[in-house]
Image: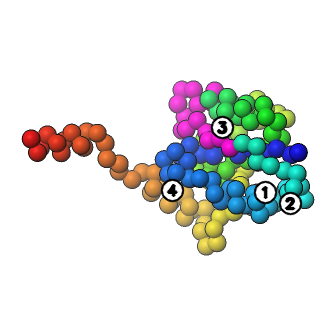
Amino acid sequence: MNKIGILTCSNTTQELGCSSYLCFQDFNEASGAFKRYAELSDKTVIAGIINCAGCPTAHAPEKLLGRIKSLTEIGVSAIHLATCVTLLCPFKERYLNILKNNFPDIDFIEGTHDQAPGITPEMFIGAMKHMLTQPKPSISNIIKKTVKRA
């Protein structure tokens, strides 16, 4: 059995609620970056999917290593960086270097699903930036509105 994992973007999954549908769809159809498994489709499984540690904090690399270790301990031979990570992560190269140095026996593959027809990477990046930077209500907004009414 060939086991693979997927590393997704924390912002995309946690902030925008991405279910990784397109990643799984392309895996099931042996398309996108999963074409490489077409001949092994009945012998290849997604053994796990995790998200990154979020945009760098003081301990992001260590957190990421721990998350990837959980996939390696279940025997994955490859980990795909989801398309959101490949296109959006400004730290992708840094993280890839750390991962490859710490897990030399794992194949790290950039990408999962293909872009939707008619959507360029630039369009995707722009849409994601727009969604992630929308103003959100905060508790201080609620307090200000409540105080004004009193």
* Residue 59 magenta-highlighted: yes
What residue sits right under mark 2 in the picture?
38
Pair 4/1: label in front: 1
Badge 1: few (under 14), some or many (20 or more) residues near its Cα, within 10 Å?
many
The answer to whether marks 1 and 2 mark residues whose Cβ atoms lie closer than 8 Å is yes
Horizontal relation, residue 57 to residue 84: left or right: left
The answer for how far apart the CA atoms under marks 4 and 3 are is 21 Å
Badge 3: few (under 14), some or many (20 or more) residues near its Cα, within 10 Å?
few
SS at circle 4: helix
Q: Would residue 26 be visible to someone looking at this image?
A: yes
The answer to whether marks 2 and 4 mark residues whose Cβ atoms lie closer than 8 Å is no
The answer for how far apart the CA atoms under marks 1 and 2 are is 7 Å
Q: Amino acid at mark 3?
A: Arg
Q: Amino acid at mark 2?
A: Ala
The image quadrant that residue 33 belongs to is: bottom right
Question: In this picture, which residue range is highlighted in magenta?
Answer: 49-62
Residue under the image location 11 percent in, 45 percent down: 149
Label 4 or label 3, whichever comes before in sequence order? 3
Residue reaching furthest to the right: 39
Label 3 or label 1, whichever comes before in sequence order? 1
What residue sits right under mark 1 in the picture?
34
Pair 2/4: label in front: 2
Q: Amino acid at mark 1?
A: Phe
* Quadrant location of the C terminus in the rendered image: top left
What residue sits right under mark 3 in the picture?
94
User: Foreground residue, 11 or 39?
Assistant: 39
What residue sits right under mark 4 in the picture?
128
User: Foreground residue, 44 or 58?
Assistant: 44
